[in-house]
Image (cartoon, rainbow, N blue to C red):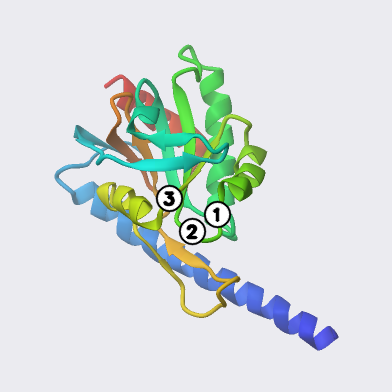
Amino acid sequence: MRWHFLRRTLHVWLVFGLVVLCAAAAWRWMRPALATQPHFVEVASGAYVLPKPDALPSFQLVKHDGTPFHNQSLKGRWTFMVFGYTHCPDFCPTTLVEFTHVHKLLAQSPHGVRDVQFVLVSVDPARDTPALLALYVPQFHPSFIGVTGEAAMIARLAESVGAVYARAPGGSDANYLIDHSTAALLVNPQGALQGVFAAPHAAKQMVQGFAKIREP
């Protein structure tokens, strides 16, 4: 019994270590890549803006409360969006915690949060039903939105904003990990991609970047 526990603990830490190493590699690659892209301009530490926002394709997904989530759902608000999944062991909960800090800081600012929303788009629609997202996402903040839907539709939206993901090797049909992009995206009130926040995320830096993107 003890050996099985130790072996399981060792396995968890090995997986965690690999994920952290992958994250570090992704961060070292992503930040200079964004900085040298002619379409991206760094406006604050880790915050990049597209001078000409990219319109998103037409999409139809579902919120965690069962209501539709589509292009019109992005209109009239700034949307902080991240692609992830409920079984994610580290990046997703960490990012959502930072989102709660961003929400708090924005609530204390002159603009407030009335025109800001936070969205997690699941890259694991096979497991992430609206019901499961409803148990997970609002734990971080009642106003946060979890989104799922058809795999092809999620892939279409992800590709349009440069988000990538793939099931990691190993695991079973019920228990597996998904490697995915860790950047947080900023969609403007017209429903177009306008900013990117590279990981690792820090709420104060994200708020500073958002302020500069919002009011250049």
The residue identified by callout 1 is: 128
Quarter holding the N terminus?
bottom right
- Whole-percent x, y for residue 103 in the image: 54, 28
- Residue at x 44%, y 45% (from the top left corner): 82
Q: Is residue 93 left or right of residue 46?
A: right
Q: Is residue 47 visible?
A: no
SS assignment at label 3: loop
Neighbour tally class for label 2: few under 14, some 14-19, many 20 plus, Cα within 10 Å: many
Distance (Cα) linking label 3 and label 1: 23 Å
In depth, the one of 119 and 111 nearer the eye is 119
Which quarter of the figure has residue 212? top left
Distance (Cα) linking label 1 and label 2: 6 Å
- Of the residues under marks 2 and 3, which one precedes in the sequence? 2
Residues at badges 1 and 2 in contact (C-beta under 8 Å)?
yes
Q: In the orientation shown, which residue stands out farthest toward the right?
A: 1
The residue identified by callout 3 is: 199
In depth, the one of 25 and 96 nearer the eye is 96
Q: Is residue 110 visible?
A: yes
Residue 124, disc: 2
SS assignment at label 2: loop
Distance (Cα) linking label 2 and label 3: 21 Å
- Of the residues under marks 3 and 1, which one precedes in the sequence? 1
